[in-house]
Image (cartoon, grey):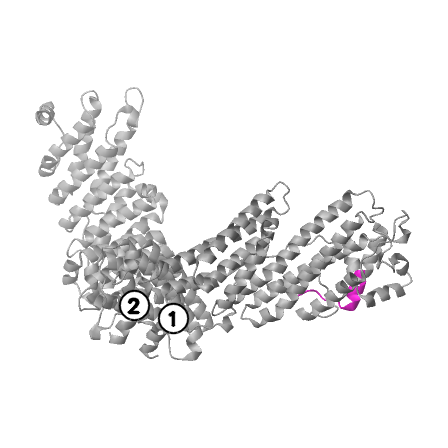
């Protein structure tokens, strides 16, 4: 065996043998957190339609995963490892719902800062961190909308499926619509940069799918708000109440922009 | 490829993360992770309608429609009511309008293929944007696997440890495995990547199980060069053949690599020193295994587990006697090995009863037995015929037993033999034959004569007076006596097997026992109820006593007076007539004491009470 070959083996062996325990530990922790996160999310998905299922416990579990990930990210010196851990935290806080609502913004902020330090910049993880905020915004507004829909359903004011919300609640619903459109806009704005990053084609498809879902949430809010308007013909002596022209106009413009961004023909259906 | 490139490749791969641990971390970061979907909205028809007509152009089209415009509130831009009649009518209009506009489906949905409940598994990078060289990829794979062992087996991966040597051995063969031709790079490099991973994992597992083992770097390198490299370089160019080769390697390479490393662990001395013939021999056996299975379509004739059993046996021979597999010019005798493997498979396949794993076990026993006695056997035979000797040995045993098993009605006691017992029966003959100089050789069929003789005697046990365990003991005695008394009990060739003395003696005693078994006592009972003792262990021991005695005095045993049979019948009469005084022990004692006289005198018809008392008193005194 020639000397260069012996050297190569030695170098390889030394490098392998000198494997830093901290690095291996961080990687193992990341794998473990990823597994915990996936298992919890799959479990959540499976039980989504089960009314007996303890949603609170699951959200708490996701928040715990997120906190673990953030703690480890703060203790890890390598920016690339930090990014991966913030990616776990961002997803977990997003899916934790109310339990993560107050923590996600700072987590995303720390994660994006780590992205700026990392070299090379992890394409998927940084994209996910960036998207986590509009994703979380969409789902948080969805939960608010559900409450408003419940309130409208409980009210006796609605006639023939008509308005059940009071004016204050109506304005809150309009705010929900605005936030949902803002979340969809956020996704549309993030897309060009993500498209230029070396993410997989599957990731772009994933992003497009979530963007369409986000729009459909806005559409659901728009439909609800539309039904909650009060016309003169409602015949209950209540004053006419209409969605603001700004909201209507913003929503009307959202679908064409979305289709253009996603490269869809104008006539294509979004299949909400 | 310049060997230095290998060095650079490995260094470059390691530099990706600066250390091996960083590579592991990178792999952990970059692997596919679960990205969840957004919650799906609850969206009803009403929302779909107002969403669709949020477009001013579509709303105008609706208002222009005389039938639909009365259902639309132009001021609030919504249906006039939320009643089902209005909503259903407008929803139908939305669907129709969508069809008219395009009728297109969203086609991107189906493209996200790795979907699991509520999300997708997505990797970090677009591969085309982050290419890694083939050598780098293999190095990373190796580092990845090695690092798995760092935590659980630190001693294996320590500096100067066996793991380091194994990695070095594989790494230094990369230049031979991956050709310079760029066109071939992709296919072969990916294949090499997988195979290196399989070998490394198998090797590290074996080395981790044997921490005391000291392996020699140069030998490991030679072993990898002879074993792993040809498997990669032999990847066919033709796509369909490639698929078959890959499928074969996927199924068997892991266990085969484990077996090869296990041989290193079992026989470390064979892999030390300056001679590398053992490595070549082991490599040649491995190549022969895969080439035989792929070239000749023999894989189905034994199970995969069976092939691996056979492979392990031949590997042990290669480690112990590499000279058997290395020819002139230090070249491995691949043809010999292929002949051996295919010959064994075809022989077993032809015997039907020994097809599959059972046959492979029999073959492995034969090869192990030959290996253990190689020093003696190969002095007598031309070494070039080693494989013929092995095949011949397997053929004689499997053929003789299969002849009987083919017709269950004539198999007698053999039909109660399970697979494992058949293997044990075969082992008795094979081990005995391999340990007996002169019994084996080209054109010799003494082994088959012995097996056929015992099998024909077993066929006579139609009443199953003996268990299969009894028969295994009888076979062991028969084989041992036949081996030291050539030609006396079973003849020297298969033509005399049927009428051989040994078979006659066993048959005669079985006849006496069967007749005795059928005899009725005073109360009309038969067999065990009548207290007959010539069955089971007594009969088994009687047969072994008779075989030993006859082997020393074959002429008398074969005389027309049938002295052994006559003696057995007479003793049975005595025992039957006084069951309170005599039992199985007495039967056997009398038989053992009197058989010598019976053979010397030709026969014994009368046995006096005094004689019986004298014999039994000796036992009592003892």
Residue B301 is left or right of residue A152, and the answer is: left
Q: Which label's residue is closer to the chain start, 2 or 1? A: 1
Relative image position of residue B214 (x, y in whole percent): 22, 60
- What number is the disc on residue B292? none
Chain letter for the residue marked with disc 2 in the picture:
B
Relative image position of residue A271 (x, y in whole percent): 71, 60
Q: Is residue B371 visible?
A: yes
Name the residue located 45 percent from the left edge and 60 percent from the top edge.
B28
- When asked about the image quadrant of residue B233, the answer is bottom left
Name the residue located 14 percent from the left edge and 62 percent from the top edge.
B379
Name the residue located 62 percent from the left edge and 47 percent from the top edge.
A48
**Pick the front one: A87 or A102:** A102
Q: Quadrant of the N terminus of chain B?
A: bottom left
Q: Quadrant of the C terminus of chain B?
A: top left
Residue B68 is left or right of residue B228, and the answer is: right
Magenta highlight on residue B172: no
* Residue numbers of the magenta segment: B94-107
Q: Nearer the viewer, mark 2 or mark 1?
A: 1
Asked if both marks, 2 and 1, belong to the same chain, the answer given is yes
**Pick the front one: A142 or B460:** A142
Chain letter for the residue marked with disc 1 in the picture:
B
Local crowd size for mark 2, using a 10 Å CA cut-off: few (<14), some (14–19), many (≥20): many
Name the residue located 60 percent from the left edge and 42 percent from the top edge.
A53
**Pick the front one: A49 or B202:** A49
Q: Is residue B293 visible?
A: no
Residue B413 is left or right of residue B59, and the answer is: left
Q: Which residue is mark 1?
A: B15
Relative image position of residue B304 (x, y in whole percent): 38, 57
- Secondary element type, mark 1: helix
Q: Which residue is mark 2?
A: B168
Q: CA distance from mark 2 to mark 1?
A: 17 Å
């Amino acid at each position: 065996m020639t000397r260069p070959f012996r050297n190569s083996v030695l170098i390889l062996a030394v490098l392998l043998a000198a494997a830093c325990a901290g690095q291996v530990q961080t990687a193992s922790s990341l794998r473990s957190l990823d597994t915990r996160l996936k298992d919890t999310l799959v479990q959540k998905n499976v039980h989504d339609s089960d009314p007996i299922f303890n949603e609170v416990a699951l959200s708490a579990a996701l928040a715990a995963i997120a906190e673990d990930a953030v703690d480890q990210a703060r203790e890890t010196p390598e920016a690339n490892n930090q990014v991966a851990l913030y990616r776990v935290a961002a997803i977990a806080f997003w899916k934790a719902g109310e339990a993560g609502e107050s923590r996600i913004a700072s987590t995303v902020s720390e994660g994006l800062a780590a992205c700026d330090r990392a070299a090379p910049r992890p394409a998927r993880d940084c994209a996910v961190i960036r998207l986590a905020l509009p994703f979380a915004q969409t789902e948080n507004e969805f939960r608010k909308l559900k409450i408003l829909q419940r309130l409208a359903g409980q009210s006796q004011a609605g006639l023939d499926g008509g308005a059940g919300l009071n004016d204050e609640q109506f304005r809150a619903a309009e705010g929900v619509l605005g936030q949902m459109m803002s979340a969809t806009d956020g996704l549309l704005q993030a897309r060009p940069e993500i498209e230029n990053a070396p993410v997989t084609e599957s990731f772009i498809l994933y992003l497009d799918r979530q963007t369409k879902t986000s729009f459909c949430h806005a559409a659901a809010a728009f439909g609800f708000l539309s039904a909650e308007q009060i016309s003169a013909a409602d015949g209950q002596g209540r004053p006419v109440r209409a969605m603001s022209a700004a909201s209507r106009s913003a929503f009307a413009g959202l679908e064409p922009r979305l289709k253009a961004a996603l490269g869809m023909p104008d006539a294509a259906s979004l299949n909400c | 490829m310049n060997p230095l490139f290998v060095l650079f490749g490995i260094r470059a791969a390691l530099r990706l993360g600066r250390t091996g641990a960083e590579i592991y971390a990178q792999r952990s970061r970059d692997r596919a992770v679960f990205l969840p979907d957004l919650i799906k909205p609850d969206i009803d028809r009403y929302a779909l309608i107002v969403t669709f007509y949020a477009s001013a152009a579509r709303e105008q089209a609706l208002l222009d429609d005389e039938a639909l415009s009365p259902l639309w509130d132009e001021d609030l831009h919504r249906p006039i009511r939320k009643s089902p009649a209005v909503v259903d009518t407008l929803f139908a209009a939305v669907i129709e309008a969508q069809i008219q506009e395009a009728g297109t489906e969203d086609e991107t949905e189906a493209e996200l293929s790795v979907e699991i409940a509520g999300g997708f598994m997505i990797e970090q990078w677009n591969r085309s944007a982050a290419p890694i060289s083939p050598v780098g990829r293999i190095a990373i794979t190796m580092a990845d696997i090695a690092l798995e062992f760092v935590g659980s087996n630190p001693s294996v991966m320590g500096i100067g440890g066996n793991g380091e040597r194994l990695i070095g051995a594989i790494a230094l063969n990369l230049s031979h495995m991956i050709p310079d031709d760029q066109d071939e790079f992709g296919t072969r490099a990916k294949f090499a990547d997988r195979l290196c991973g399989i070998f490394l994992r198998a090797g590290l597992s074996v080395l981790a199980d044997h921490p005391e083992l000291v392996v020699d770097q140069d030998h490991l390198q030679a072993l990898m060069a002879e074993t792993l490299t040809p498997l990669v370089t032999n990847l066919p160019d033709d796509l369909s053949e490639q698929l078959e080769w890959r499928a074969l390697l996927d199924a068997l390479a892991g266990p085969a690599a484990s077996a090869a490393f296990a041989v290193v662990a079992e026989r470390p001395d064979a892999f030390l020193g300056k001679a590398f013939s053992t490595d070549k021999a082991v490599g040649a056996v491995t190549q022969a295994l895969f080439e035989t299975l792929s070239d000749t379509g023999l894989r189905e004739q034994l199970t995969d587990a069976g092939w691996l059993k056979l492979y392990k046996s031949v590997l042990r021979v290669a480690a112990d006697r590499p000279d058997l597999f290395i020819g002139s010019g230090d070249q491995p005798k691949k043809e010999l090995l292929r002949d051996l493997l295919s010959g064994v498979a075809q022989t077993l396949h032809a015997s039907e009863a020994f097809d599959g794993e059972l046959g492979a076990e029999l073959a492995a026993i034969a090869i192990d037995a030959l290996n253990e006695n190689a020093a003696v056997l190969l002095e007598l035979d031309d070494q070039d015929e080693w494989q013929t000797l092995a095949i011949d040995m397997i053929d004689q045993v499997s053929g003789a037993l299969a002849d009987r098993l083919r017709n269950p009605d004539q198999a007698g006691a053999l039909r109660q033999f399970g697979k494992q017992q058949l293997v044990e029966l075969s082992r008795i003959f094979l081990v005995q034959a391999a340990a007996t100089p002169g019994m084996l050789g080209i054109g010799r069929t003494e082994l088959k004569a012995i097996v056929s003789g015992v099998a024909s005697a077993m066929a006579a046990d139609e009443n199953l007076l003996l268990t299969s365990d009894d028969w295994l003991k009888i076979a062991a005695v028969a084989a041992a006596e036949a081996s030291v008394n050539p030609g006396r009990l079973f003849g020297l060739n298969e033509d005399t097997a049927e009428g051989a003395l040994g078979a006659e003696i066993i048959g005669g005693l079985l006849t006496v026992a069967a007749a005795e078994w059928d005899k009725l006592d005073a109360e009309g009972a038969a067999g065990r109820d009548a207290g007959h003792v010539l069955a089971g262990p007594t009969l088994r021991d009687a047969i072994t006593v008779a075989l030993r005695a006859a082997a020393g005095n074959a002429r008398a045993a074969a005389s027309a007076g049938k002295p052994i049979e006559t003696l057995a019948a007479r003793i049975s009469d005595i025992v039957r007539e006084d069951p309170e005084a005599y039992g199985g022990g007495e039967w056997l004692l009398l038989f053992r004491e009197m058989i010598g006289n019976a053979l010397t005198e030709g026969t014994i018809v009368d046995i006096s009470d005094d004689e019986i008392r004298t014999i039994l008193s000796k036992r009592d005194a003892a």
